[in-house]
Image: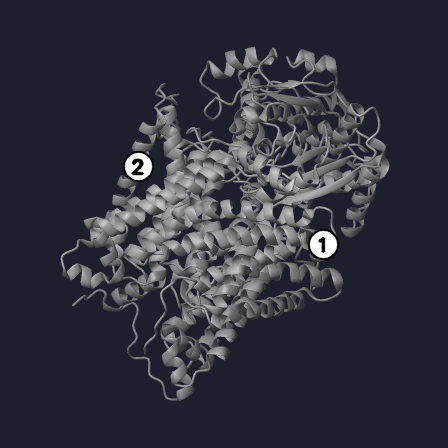
Amino acid sequence: MMNMTRMAAVLAVTMTAAAPAVAQSLHFPMLNYRTGPFGPNGMAFADGYQDYLTLINERDGGIGGVPIRMTECETAYNTERGVECYQGIRGDSPLVIQPLSTGITYQLIPRTMEDQVPMHTMGYGRTSAVNGEVFNWTFNYPGTYWDGASVIINYLLEENDGSLEGKKIVLLYHNSAYGREPIPTLTRLAEHHGYELITIGVDSPGQEQGNQWLQIRRERPDYVTMWGWGVMNAVAIQEAANIRFPMENFIGVWWSGSEQDVRPAGAGAHGYKSLAMHGTGRDYPIYDDIQEYVIDRGLAAGTGDEVGTVLYSRGMYASMLAVEAAKKAQEIHGVEEITPAMMRDGMANLVITEELMEELGLPGFGPAFEVTCQNHGGTGEAMIQQWDAESGTWSLITDWIAPNRDLIMEMVMEDSLAYAAENNIEPQCLERSGG
Amino acid sequence: MPDTLLFAMEAALNGLTAGVMYALVALGFVLIFKASGIFNFSQGVMALFAALTLVGLQTGQIPFSHLINAIFGTRMHHFGWTLPTVVAIAGTVVVMVIFAWAVERFIFRHLVNQEPIILFMATIGLAYFLEGFGDIMWGAEVKRLDVGLPQGMSGPVDDLTFAWFGYGFYMDRLEIWAALIASLLVISLVLFSQYTKQGRALRAVADDHQAALSVGISLRFIWVLVWSLAGIVALVAGMMWGAKSGVQFSLSLIALKALPVLILGGFTSIPGAIVGGLIIGVGEKLFDFFMQPIVGGATENWFAYMLALAFLLFRPQGLFGEKIIERV
Amino acid sequence: MIYREAGDFKTSYAADNQTFPLRGDRLAYYLAVIFALGVVPFFINDYWANAIVIPFLIYTIAALGLNILIGYCGQLSLGTGAFMATGAYAAFKLTTAFPSLNIIFVIILAGVVTAGVGVAFGLPSLRIKGFYLAVATLAAQFFLIWLYTRTPWFFNYSPTGMISMPTRELFGYPVTGASATAVSGYLLCAVFLIASAWLARNLTRGTLGRQWMAIRDMDIAAEIIGVNPLRAKLSAFAVSSFLVGISGALFFTVYLGAAEAGESFGIDKSFLVLFMVIIGGLGSILGSFLGAFLLVVGPVLLKILLVNNLGWPTDVAAHLEIMIIGALIILFLVMEPHGLTALWRTIKEKLRLWPFPH
């Protein structure tokens, strides 16, 4: 029993040490995953997210003069751990929660609403959170899965001179909440454009896809789209190369288009395409600063070998949007030390312009968009990138492609209003918080 | 010939090769269970660990670099060399033998004469430990495994079947190679256990521990030996599966694919593991092919278990297992 | 001297046969219940309730259920995760189909449904034994999870396949959904745990429990002396699945609030509960509590220690954590194969003699 009391004492000490009310800092929590089946993906994102915040601290001395305080919590892409992490930080005025997991997002939507903590799910999570009147505290700019699905179809329309009549399109999806998201959109668009949609599910983690690809080989589809994550991406690309499916007709969502997905397949992956919600590579002026202030000072997160990769860029982009929202919040409220409620106002009034991106050292990196109460989802524009196996780089092959926003907003309204009715939410815009 | 039949034949053919891949993992289980009665749950993680070690040695990674960097604030990853595949494989075998020795020395020596469930639990503990250990030692990134195995569609099979049926069958060259390597592995295992002194000792231990002990066979040595053999089998399985998907965490889950193979073939039979693997491979591919339109796909996760369950109801000891004799 | 068994005289059979025949034990038990229901609710905060205490209570119920099956009846099962999922999905279907049905009945009915499913998957146990049975229960694990993720009826045709719990009230206080307070959820789980422990304890002391143990120790011998293996095995599956189903229902309704079968109730869950049972001690009610406590609190404690106090990177800490858990399991098995309860027994032995060890 002695042991137990000692353990309890250690626990008590650490608990108090874990949540100090540090004044004069902005708390940016990070719910990362560097372990488990999706660890390799989570790692790159986390590094990018952290490095950008470190850059702001080192170069600018924080946001508006207030230093950023980062805390990291490992979720292993596991919902329970995610909830535990959230419980640990919620009392510590976290400015924005970014769980990087659709499962955890669903857990946290009602909780963050209740606790009044803003959450940003960039390119994942619950699509109908676009409707800010219902989901006051959840943001998913600059794009959602439904936008992504629509962008892919619009891109294919462009490729096929405006008609997909009689084409066969396969959706290969991760059999989870995440993977099933695009099905309603693609089904509706199929009615519009007259293509035949075949959905094929892969159970997590997706180590084995022999059956699925034999089926694809038999069906001889014109295009294959993929909503995958983790090892499923790499295996699918390898299998596609094996059955000699034309890679340029294989298009993944933005979560299926990172270096680690295509590298294991080697030369076979050449020509594979995926959506890109932002630019990639180290050709942006910001990397000079990251090199100078972060890497050269030995402050880079993780091993430092992810810099410039797709998921690293995504983490950096997410963190950049969070910092801009914090700046906006400071501007709106006229105080430097903002609260989560003020941060929400900053996010709800965020305006990203091309000039701003240029100023930040990221010209053309992400789309220009404006967040409003009715639209928490930005414009939904995305580009298409293609893998070059010889040089080992992604190259952008299109400009920004807009989704079919009318249709998507219609679906968003249906879904979000159903959610509001289920949970007795009165749809309304939130007033700015006082102070 | 009607298309459906052709497609079914193609699916069955792919099932055969997939079955060999399952059997590869199941083999490791059988070896250890036969010699020590331990149901080794960590076989899958051993495959992951072996593959990680192989890639690590090949690309000259510094072991434990994450941990060292975290403690001392250094930034190092690689020694800066690449080893030839053969040398790396030999190195990995050495590591797996050391691992086998450590397992015997630190775990199972202390658990002699415990109930089977305790031994089983110990291997689950070992699986957890090894998983964390592998990640700390080599890092958790996805790694590309390149040992020169061919990949992609097999041209000759495609041409041949096209000439016969007017429809070219798809077969993965990697899986054809895996089948060849698996048969080599089985033949050498059989030769080893039939014609060498250690092999005979192994069979003696499998038959009766106490009798073997009484004629002077060292149980400890035999245990290290079978764990080393299982480690080598794990290395082969890890290489085959790792070449398909890159070396990463999910590789450890292939153990779950091997379990139904095991109960189908019986825990104690090497031919059982092979035949069980083939039956399961073909069964699940055909089931998915025919049932896919009705119940939706992705049945392969449970079908193998259901098939094995159905078999067990008729033969509770598996196809090739030894008959269970119970006495009061 | 501190713990003594002598001097506690009984004058009736009823008194001699009561659950806690020793006064000291009885007092400790009453104190624990009073503490859990009367003191903790006033002091518990959200972090403690949601991150540690509620999962501990729920896992304990699951461990109790599995302990009946493995520890008392000797039937190894690896399908706990799927049975928890069954409880969760049953609770979801019931509460959305009958919104006015009291949440307590919803949870109990979810347990009943799970018991039915458990019996169905327990049938092979009449023919298959040992590890073969363990692998056969994996069939339940994979099949049920596949069924729940593939059949839209189970998740009310929601486009994402997630089930989410609407707010339900008990005595005017919300106990589920986002507006529920930590205390109400805690009390609900605590009441269910106490009831489950009471049920498990009394069942295992009675005829049924003795039949289970006879089957566990040697099924052929038990059959010869007149224990009906069909009845004994299937009742063990039923009771075990009932408790596991309740824990699954609570896990979904009170703790998670939204769930997805494959993600929340995967095979890891089966193993986690199995660990709790083995580490705590097979065939012991107290063991289920201790095992669940160690495996829920241990990782959180390790994380706090390594990340918050030593400032190690989270990934290294997470890997170390897995290693340490694995090593702990092995260490336990080597040092004390009969689990934490055996350790507790040794402590009692020591206390009995203290301070005069000879």
* Mark 1 secondary-structure assignment: helix
Q: Against B86, is A91 above or below? A: below
Q: Residue at x 66, y 51 (%)?
A: B292
Q: Nearer the viewer, residue B299 or A120?
A: B299
Chain letter, disc 1 residue: C
Choose mark 1 or mark 2, whichever is in front. Answer: 2
Q: Are marks 1 and 2 on the same chain?
A: no
- The image quadrant that residue A367 belongs to is top right
Residue corresponding to mark 1:
C152
Q: Amino acid at mark 1?
A: Pro
- The label on residue B93 is 2
Q: Is residue A374 left or right of residue A259?
A: right
Q: Amino acid at mark 2?
A: Val
Chain letter, disc 2 residue: B
Q: Position of residue A388 (x, y in %)?
A: 59, 19
Q: Position of residue B168 (x, y in %)?
A: 62, 38
